[in-house]
Image (spheres, helix red, strand yellow):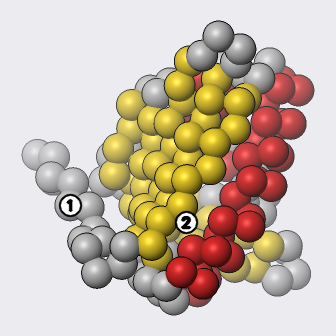
């Protein structure tokens, strides 16, 4: 029997960010990069432990092999080729459960990836992530457009 998905209560942590980027790759390739290839663009290679299924846990490291930054979470929503949503807990979120949602929206010239990261306990922590996400999405675009 499937367990119901229980998203975190973000009502006391209202800080969030949205980053958008027009991507060259197809929605199916972007979806695969989020569900099967995070270590190609976001995580330290070989560090991702993830089974792409709702309610499954996930783990990955960012940083470098010498200085790792562990990330923990659980998958909240998977809509193939449209949306991925998961929780994200790390030292950089002060150990609280935030939510990352990536949507792949068709438009006349490419696919608009809309990333929303919500549930930050402070504006300063949100701002730190606001600085990092654009570079990560640029890397994702580079990797996926090279294989498209």
Splitting the image into 4 quarters, where does residue 144 fall? top right
SS class of the residue under badge 1? loop
Disc 2 residue crowd, few under 14, some 14–19, many 20+, Cα 10 Å: some
SS class of the residue under badge 2? strand
Residue 4 image point, x, y percent: 15, 52
Residue 122 image point, x, y percent: 49, 85
Mark linked to residue 59: 2
Above or below for 5 versus 103: below
Closer-to-camera residue (139/12): 12
Residue found at x 61% / y 35%:
113
Residue found at x 50% / y 36%:
103
From this viewpoint, is residue 100 visible? Answer: yes
Mark linked to residue 36: none
Left or right: residue 24 versus residue 119 is right
> Alpha carbon of mark 1 to alpha carbon of mark 2: how far?
18 Å
Q: Which residue is mark 1?
A: 6
């Amino acid at each position: 029997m499937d367990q119901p998905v229980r998203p975190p209560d973000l009502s006391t942590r209202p800080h969030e960010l949205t980053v958008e980027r027009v991507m060259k790759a197809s929605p199916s390739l972007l979806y695969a990069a989020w569900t099967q290839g995070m270590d190609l663009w976001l995580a330290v290679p070989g560090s991702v432990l993830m089974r792409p299924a709702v309610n499954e846990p996930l783990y990955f490291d960012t940083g470098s092999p010498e200085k790792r930054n562990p990330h923990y979470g659980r998958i909240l929503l998977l809509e193939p080729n449209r949306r991925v949503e998961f929780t994200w807990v790390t030292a950089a979120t002060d150990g609280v459960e935030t939510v990352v949602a990536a949507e792949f929206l068709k438009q006349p010239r490419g696919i608009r990836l809309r990333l929303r990261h919500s549930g930050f306990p402070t504006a300063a922590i949100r701002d730190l992530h606001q600085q990092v996400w654009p570079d990560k999405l640029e890397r994702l675009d580079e990797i996926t457009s090279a294989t498209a």
